[in-house]
Amino acid sequence: MSFKAFEVSEGPDNGYRSSVVNKSVDDLPPGEVLINVQYSSLNYKDALSSSGNKGVTKNYPHIPGIDAAGIVEKSADPHFLKGDKVIVTGYDLGMNTSGGFAEYIRVPASWPIRLPEGLSRKRSMMYGTAGLTAALSVYNLRKMGVSPPNGKVAVTGASGGVGSMAVAILSHLGYHVTAVTGKKDAVNMLIDLGAKEVIPREALDDQSKKPFLKAQYAAAVDTVGGNILATVLKSLHYGGVATCCGLVNSPDLHTTIYPFILKGVRLIGIDSALCDHALRKEVWEHLATDWRPAKMDRLINTCKLENIQEHLNKMLRGQLSGRYIVKISS
């Protein structure tokens, strides 16, 4: 059986080229579950993979796509039956395992989860890894006791996929959200999603090297890392909580231990790729029900296999806002 896929290959000049090609199901890696993919979504890891980043994808040619939603075509595992609607995000999908930018994927039975009631395959990819990551951040803030009355919650990189989803979910749950972005043209979108205020990233990029700044936030969802995260930690209230899940600004964190030992600040790392399966299911259930933002559709753009690369290039240049879903097959 043949199918269409967006494939990235390495050229003789050490450059990388992408094209839509025909593949065979026999080309797919081993696994217990064969899935007909209807939708995927664009993520920063996909952009890195498509550009030949060997830290994400070691061998080429390769099919990126760390997200996929579709229907089980064949299963060697009794937990899944032909026709089951499923989601696959994270693990090794789209990194070194043939990914969701294709009409078919084959994966281990431990990777998919059944699509929750009330959530369509298309809407699940409106969330995708970005939405799951944002929701895991919210989950951890709430687990640490952060509730709306505690004060403002800052979201850095707010116009990106994870950041915009975090703004939408937190606002829906009644939090006072301060959106932090470097994109002036994203202000109206963020206000529309429920942010109470939008501030430029320079406002949270302190260069003074002071161990503390004026306490402004009860919590934060940081998606960029670097000095922005260091500034966030210095700006939290006593007992404040920050989650971190990205490094667009920098993977380095230069700070002191003072916020942690004198103000009881807590920093929680978020990983959606290998998070516990039971937690993954619980968070997806929240996204299908009580955490479902009313205005989420306004974040969404749609593309096809044929124009994935142009959008991934823009993502690498920091020129995309919101979420992009990919319609794979009907």
Image (cartoon, rainbow, N blue to C red):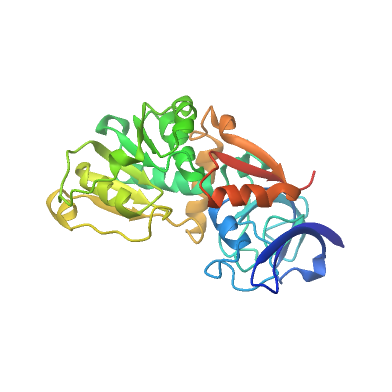
Find residue 156 and report its image quarter: top left
Quadrant housing the C terminus: top right
Residue 42 in sight from this viewpoint: no
Find residue 72 and report its image quarter: bottom right
Q: Where residue 172 appears, x then y in whole percent?
A: 45, 29
Which residue appears at 38% of the width and 57% of the height? 250
Find residue 251 and report its image quarter: bottom left
Q: Where residue 34 appears, x then y in whole percent?
A: 75, 61
Which residue appears at 56% of the width and 38% of the height? 288
Does 32 appear above or below 118?
below
Report whether 141 appears left or right of 310.
Answer: left
Report whether 12 appears left or right of 136.
Answer: right
Does 317 appear above or below 198?
below
Residue 53 in sight from this viewpoint: yes
Does 244 appear above or below 26?
above
Which residue appears at 62% of the width and 44% of the height? 125
Q: Where residue 15 appears, x then y in whole percent?
A: 65, 67
Q: Where residue 46 appears, x then y in whole percent?
A: 59, 57
